[in-house]
Amino acid sequence: MLSAQPAPGFLRRHGLLLALTLIIVIHAVDRLAIVILLEDIKRDLLLSDAQLGLLSGFAFVALYVVAGIPMAFVSDRSNRSRTIGVALTAMGGMTMLCGMAQNFLQLVAARCGLGISASPCVPAAHSIIADVYPPAQRTTALSITESGFFVGSFVGLWVCGWIATDYGWRIAFFAIGMLPLLLGLSVLAWMRDPVRALRDNKVQLGFRDTMRTIVGVRAVRWYVAGSAFAVFASAGMMTWLPALMIRSYGMTRTEAGGLIGAINGVGGLILTIAVGVVADRLARREARWNLWIPALLFAASAPFAAFAFLSHSPAVLIGCFAVAACMITACSAPIISYSQQITPPNVHAMVTASIFLVFNLAGFGLAPLAVGALSDYLARTGQPEHSLQQALLYLTAPSLVIAALLVFIGGRFEAETSPPPQRAEP
C-alpha cells in the first residue's frame, strides 16, 4: 500500500529549496510591509492603535487561517506548485489594492483578500520539502526556507520604509505588490511539482479523519499550545516595535525599518539555520530534541523581552529585543519538522496548516490587537507617552514563560503517531 518513489536529484532538490525560500521571502515582504507603514496610515486615515492592531493582525490572519485549512487539504491532493503560483499572483493584486484604500473598511477588505490569497503558500512549500528531503535533513531544509521570513522582514521593513519616506505609503504598497505578481507568473511557467516521496494510494483520509489523526498525537496538543504563546510574544514585538521607535524615540521610518529589519534578517537567518543544523544532529539520537531546543530558547528569551521594555534606552531596548526575537523565531523549523516526522505523509500539508492556524490566530491575529487595545487603555489611565511600551512589557515576557513550560511538557511524550482510521473515505 505504501510505495517509495525515487527522490529528486541533488541539483533539482536544492534548486527547489532555493525557489521555495524565495517564495517565502516574497510572502513575508507582502505580509509584514504594513508594520513600518502603520504610523503613516494612522495619520492619513485618522485611526486608533486598536484599529491599527486589527489591520496588521486579524484583518489578515482571520481569513489567512480559515482559508489555509481547505487550501492545505487541496494541496495534499493536487499540484502544489500550481497552487503556489496562483496564490502569489493573487497576493500581488491584493497588496496593490491596499495602496488604493481610501478608508479603514476598504483597507480591512484588502488585507482580508491578501490573507486568503497568501494562505496556500507555506503549507504547500512544507509539503514539498517533506517529499524531497529525508527526515535526517528535513529540519535543516525547513530552517533554510524559514529563514526566508527573516530576509523578507528585512526587505519589507527597510525597502517599504525607504519608499514611504520618499513617495508615500500608497506607492510602497504598489511597489511591493509587483514582487509576488511577477514571481507567481514565473512559478506557473517554470516550476514543476515533485513526485510525492511516499503516498498511500489506497487510503485517502477525509477532512474529519485527517484532523483526528493530527490532534490524536498527544505531544501535538501541548507543544502547539505552548508555541502559540511564543508566537503571541514575537508578533506583538514585531508589529509594534517600529511604531514605538518612531513614536517614542524619534526614529525615522527608514531608520526603524532598516534597524529592526536587519536584526530579523541577519540575526534571525543565522540563528534559524544554526538551530536547524543542531536540531537535526541531536534528533538523530532522540527526536524530541526538536521540542526541547525550542523550550530552552523560549525560556531564555523571556528575561530579554522583560529587560527590553523595562528600559528607556533605545540601545538596550533594541539589543534585548534582538536577542529575544531571534531566539523565538528560530524555533519554528524544529517544531514543524517534528510534526512532519510523527504524522503520516498524506497529512503533511494539513499538519502545517493546522499549526499555522493556531499560531496565526493566537499570535499574529490576537497579539497586535491586544497590544494596541491595552496601549489605548493605558494611554487613557496613565502616561500616554509610555503606554505602548508598557503594553508590550505586560504581554510578552509572561507569554514566553508559559510557552517554555507547555512545550517542555509536550517533549515528555514519546514520539508516536496516532493510529490511522479504520475506515477509508472515498
Image (cartoon, grey):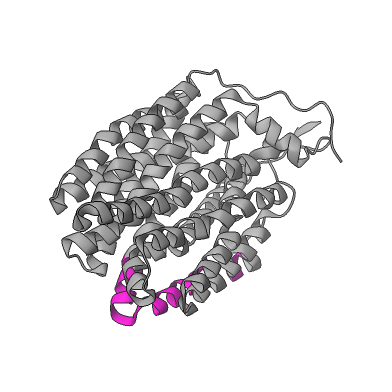
Residue 284 appears in the figure: no
The x and y percentages for residue 306 are 24, 39
- Direction bottom: furthest residue: 167
Magenta stretch bounds: 158-187
Residue at the (23%, 64%) spot, across then down: 246
Residue 419 position (above or below residue 142): above
Q: Is residue 164 magenta?
A: yes
- Direction left: furthest residue: 313
The quarter of the picture where residue 408 lies is top left
Q: In front: 56, or 218?
A: 56
Give the total number of marks visible in the rendering.
0
The x and y percentages for residue 366 are 45, 49
Q: In front: 76, or 116?
A: 116
Residue at the (67%, 53%) spot, across then down: 71
Residue 278 position (above or below residue 385): above
- Direction front: furthest residue: 381
The x and y percentages for residue 303 are 24, 34
The quarter of the picture where residue 245 lies is bottom left
The quarter of the picture where residue 80 lies is bottom right
Q: Dividing the image into 4 quarters, which one contains the N terminus?
A: top right
The x and y percentages for residue 238 are 34, 52
Residue 217 position (above or below residue 81): above
